[in-house]
Image (cartoon, rainbow, N blue to C red):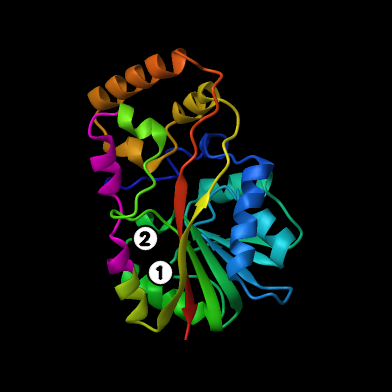
Amino acid sequence: MRTIDYDREQYQDYARGRALSQQQLQVWISAFEAVLPERRPLVGLDVGSGTGRFTPALAGAFGPVTGVEPSVRMREVAQTQSPHPDVRYLAGAAEDMPVPAGSADYALLFLSWHHVQDKTRAARELARVLRPGGRLLLRANFSDHHPRPWWLEYFPRGYEVDASLFQPLHEVIAMFTSVGWRVTSFGTVTEPSSGTCGDMLERLRLRTLSFFAQLSPDELEAGFRRLEQAVAADPGAPPPVFAEPLLTLELR
């Protein structure tokens, strides 16, 4: 996987390219609510919080949240565009979080796990910062449980390249359970579509997905040409929806 330096790439367009509608955001908050303890408030960690697309919503639904993000530029955007009185954004990473041991009730990693360099260390660090019984919400793709978004088929080697970014599910589970976690649930969440296929194409052109960084210039050109031709046939159509994996673990 080609690593992405978010202080040099994507930070200017990330919030726009990865924006969620209020309906989409609420679907995710409801999915998280279903697997979190009922008591309120809950102290949360948004690990790999990026530009803060989830952090304020988590705070509004569950209680105070710390966004942990290694990129200076991404944190700057979050602090400017995604403020909330119960949110703070700190420099850190999944392997090294600047919060006390046993200080949080849950942690969310939303499409950030594949960026973690030392995954075993991160699994232990997440165990350190959560209280016993704390929940880890891991919205990740897995090579053997891949959502296959509709636009991927238009890019040469699309599925092959994207799937190669992710571990198989059993490998992730084995890693976490070996350091004190247990699986509480695994399922999928269907995020409703927002806007049109034409709107989606415009967001994809911003190339704020890790997938695009793995392709050659020729593959990018060929893929976008094919995708543009397909969307041109009916640009006002709603984008197809797909089921997205969500793994929930509990600290024993």
Pointer 2 residue: 116
Q: Which residues are magenta?
A: 155-172
- Crowd rating for badge 1 (residues with CA inside 10 Å; few <14, some 14–19, many 20+): some
Q: Residue at x 29, y 53 (%)?
A: 143
Q: Residue at x 57, y 36 (%)?
A: 193
Asked whether 185 or 46 is in front, the reply is: 185
Asked whether 155 or 125 is in front, the reply is: 155
Q: Is residue 226 left or right of residue 208?
A: left
Residue 214 visible in the displayed image: yes
Residue 101 visible in the displayed image: no
Q: Quadrant of residue 153?
A: top left
Tag 1 and tag 2, C-beta contact below 8 Å: yes
In the rendered image, the vertical position of residue 62 relative to residue 188, given as above or below = below
Q: CA distance from mark 1 to mark 2?
A: 8 Å
Q: Is residue 98 left or right of residue 169?
A: right
Residue reaching furthest to the right:
85
